[in-house]
Amino acid sequence: LYNEATMKGMLSILQDYVNRCQDGDEKAVSPKIDLMMTLDTKNDNATPIIKPSVIVFEMVCMDRDDPQAAKDFDEFLGRFKKLRGWFPHWDGKWDGIHHLPMSKISLGFTRQAPAVTKEGRENVRPYNKTTYGSNSPLKNGFVEAYGNLLDRLAHDKHDVHCVFQVGVGGGAQRRNGVAGKSAISHRNARTMIVFDLFRPETKESIAAAVE
């Protein structure tokens, strides 16, 4: 569940991962790990159920038998566990029996009501969208600047709902690029940010989203 301290702690973990996701980085993260992070602020989707603001931290290790991959995965997972709140968590068990596939975990968040509408949209409302991508490391000040902005949105009084998603480079993008399996232009990117603001068609809400 969202709170400002947890959000900034997550952004700090995210910044460290982004700045270590490529070959040649100091303490480079194994390419067998993938990471994505989302903040989803209050979203009613015209249903009786009011969703709380939540932070979703998705990390996948494709090979626990690889010592470097396992070490890096456990490092970031351990930092995440120190920040998390009381909401249910799916860590997976490494005995091959109790592991819960990421596809099953994310199904309710991305494909089923009330997280999405019956048409599959994240929100029924009109929206303002901004996207960013960069091959550069995240600079000092990123955590505080984004943390403050996201906290304002989590407590917004103009009925603006935010979905902030960050895809991180490295991982499968780097691995598949090296193997010649991918020719997508952003395979060497460090950061891919999607910043969506859903709001009603009122002057106040539109102005708040634009600001």
Image: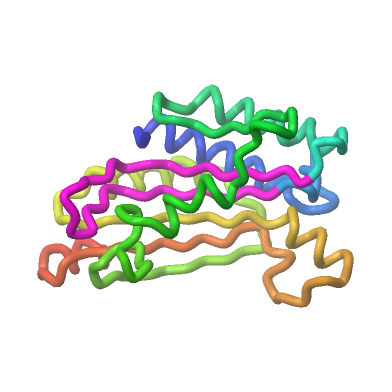
Query: Is 123 colored magenta in this rendering?
Result: no
Question: Residue visible at 82% across and 59% down?
Answer: 175
Quadrant into which the N terminus falls: top left
Position of residue 75 measured from the top left corner of the image (x, y, whole percent) = 70, 29
Q: Residue furthest front?
A: 97
Answer with the quarter of the image where residue 76 lies.
top right
Count of numbered marks: 0
Q: Picture quarter containing residue 126?
A: bottom left
Quadrant where the image shows the C terminus: bottom left
Query: In this figure, which colouring scheme has been used for the structure?
Result: rainbow
Q: In this view, does 189 lie above or below 92?
A: below
Residue 187 image-quadrant placement: bottom right
Residue at point 44% right, 41% down? 144
178 relative to 105, above or below? below
Q: What stretch is highlighted in magenta?
A: 34-62
Between 203 and 83, the one nearer to me in the picture: 83
From the top left corner, tell me how far across and down residue 209 is, in percent. 25, 63
Q: Is residue 48 found inside the magenta-colored segment of the image? A: yes
**Residue 124 vs residue 178: left or right?**
left
Residue 26 shows in the view? no
Q: Residue at x 57, y 52 (%)?
A: 103
Can you give x and y, in whole percent of width and height, for residue 78 in the image? Answer: 63, 26
Q: Decide if residue 32 is on the left or right side of residue 210.
A: right
- Tell me where residue 202 appears, x and y as whole percent: 11, 69
Tell me what residue is drawn at x 55 percent, y 26 percent: 81
Nearest the camera: 40 or 26?
40
Does residue 102 appear to the left or right of 179 in the view shown? left
In this rendering, the answer to whether 148 lies above or below 129 is above
Q: Is residue 103 at all visible to an observer of this figure?
A: yes
Relative to 33, does residue 210 appear above or below in the rendering?
below
